[in-house]
């Protein structure tokens, strides 16, 4: 029997195939995500085989930890790291998924990857929309139906207050003070803060609360579930995070921005545009509910890009003369 045939029939290969089927059938992952898992696990399997390990049951925490170290140390022909921290972190997710699958299927007694730490991934720079793009999204909802009034109020509030999606769907009517144009939201760790909103968002909320929400409560099949929630679904219950996501995605699709849009992008855009127009960094920190100023400072990188663009196009000596 050839060594190749042995590899094809070993325990590791059998379980990797079963895991791939489970990812596709049970978890329903996309084709691209499945391909990424397979690619990362092929590298992991090759690493194990080179060390004489052909059965996941024989892998311990030290082995997985050494694998992560091997990924960190690998360099290409130019001496540059072969895998970025984000790629290593993704690879470890695949390894954890595989070993957890083995445990859940009672094919191994423990998960050796459970306590292995992934490398810290540097924070990415948020990709804010331009002010014109935000305006297009906000203006994409038309009509005066209860759902149109609700969706317009949601989009305006996400951008006006820079609130998180969980904060938005968690709003109760008592948290909305239209007279003072402020919202009371509860952020991470149940920390309470007051968020101002502008005239446009206040008007959209007023229209929804006066003319949209009462009809959703009245026509909803589960109106008793509405409680004091500000934003309701078509059944009269509190709108979920997933429902809010769908509303934002639909608005973005109408204006061709679906590839760049999410509720968090509106939060990014709110912060970036405030800084672009001269807001103090600590004011933006307070608005967004960041515990640390360093978290807010990532938005200054976005504004610095805008500053450079404006400078290059405006300063008479910013570009070399021909």
Image: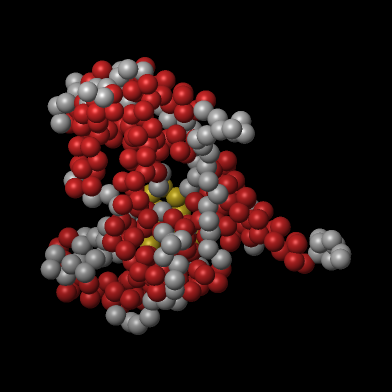
Residue 246 location in percent, x, y?
32, 63
Single out the residue that lies furthest toward the left. Answer: 221
Q: Residue 134 placed where, x, y %?
A: 50, 68
Q: Left or right: 320 with respect to 288?
A: right
Instruction: Give the left or right position of residue 186, taking residue 3 as reference.
Output: right
Residue at position x 26%, y 65% in the image: 232
Closer to the camera, 140 or 97? 97
Image point 56% across, 68% down: which residue? 131
Q: Residue furthest front?
A: 1
Residue 3, x across and y down, in percent: 28, 24
Query: Residue drawn at (75%, 66%), measured in percent from left and top?
Result: 313
Establish if 100 lies above or below 310. above
**Residue at the (24%, 41%) spot, across then down:** 20
- In the rendering, at what x and y percent does residue 212 appear? 29, 75
Work out whether 142 lies above or below 67: below
Q: Nearer the viewer, residue 80 or 251?
A: 80
């Amino acid at each position: 029997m050839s060594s190749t045939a042995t590899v094809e029939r070993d325990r590791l290969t059998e379980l990797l195939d079963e895991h791939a089927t489970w990812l596709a059938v049970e978890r329903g992952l996309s084709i691209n995500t499945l391909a990424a898992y397979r690619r990362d696990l092929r590298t992991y399997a090759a690493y194990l085989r080179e060390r004489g390990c052909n059965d996941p049951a024989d892998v311990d925490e030290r082995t997985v930890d050494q694998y992560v170290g091997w990924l960190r140390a690998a360099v290409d022909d130019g001496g540059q790291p072969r895998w970025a921290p984000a790629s290593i972190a993704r690879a470890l997710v695949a390894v954890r998924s595989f070993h957890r699958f083995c445990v859940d299927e009672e094919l191994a007694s423990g998960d050796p990857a459970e306590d292995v730490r992934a490398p810290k991934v540097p924070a990415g720079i948020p990709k804010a929309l331009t002010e014109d793009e935000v305006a297009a999204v906000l203006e994409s909802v038309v009509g005066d139906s209860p759902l149109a009034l609700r969706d317009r109020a949601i989009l305006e509030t996400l951008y006006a207050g820079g609130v998180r999606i969980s904060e938005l769907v968690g709003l109760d009517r008592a948290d909305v003070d239209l007279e003072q144009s402020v919202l009371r939201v509860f952020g991470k760790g149940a920390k309470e803060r007051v968020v101002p909103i502008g005239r446009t968002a206040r008007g959209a909320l007023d229209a929804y609360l006066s003319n949209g929400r009462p009809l959703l409560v009245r026509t909803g099949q589960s109106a008793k579930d509405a409680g004091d929630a500000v934003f309701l679904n078509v059944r009269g219950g509190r709108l979920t995070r997933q429902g809010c996501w769908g509303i934002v995605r639909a608005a973005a699709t109408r204006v061709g921005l679906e590839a760049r849009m999410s509720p968090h992008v509106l939060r990014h855009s709110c912060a970036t545009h405030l800084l672009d127009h001269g807001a103090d960094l600590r004011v933006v920190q307070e608005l967004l509910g960041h515990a640390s100023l360093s978290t807010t400072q990532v938005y200054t990188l976005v504004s610095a890009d805008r500053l450079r663009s404006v400078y290059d196009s405006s300063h008479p000596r910013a570009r070399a003369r021909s």
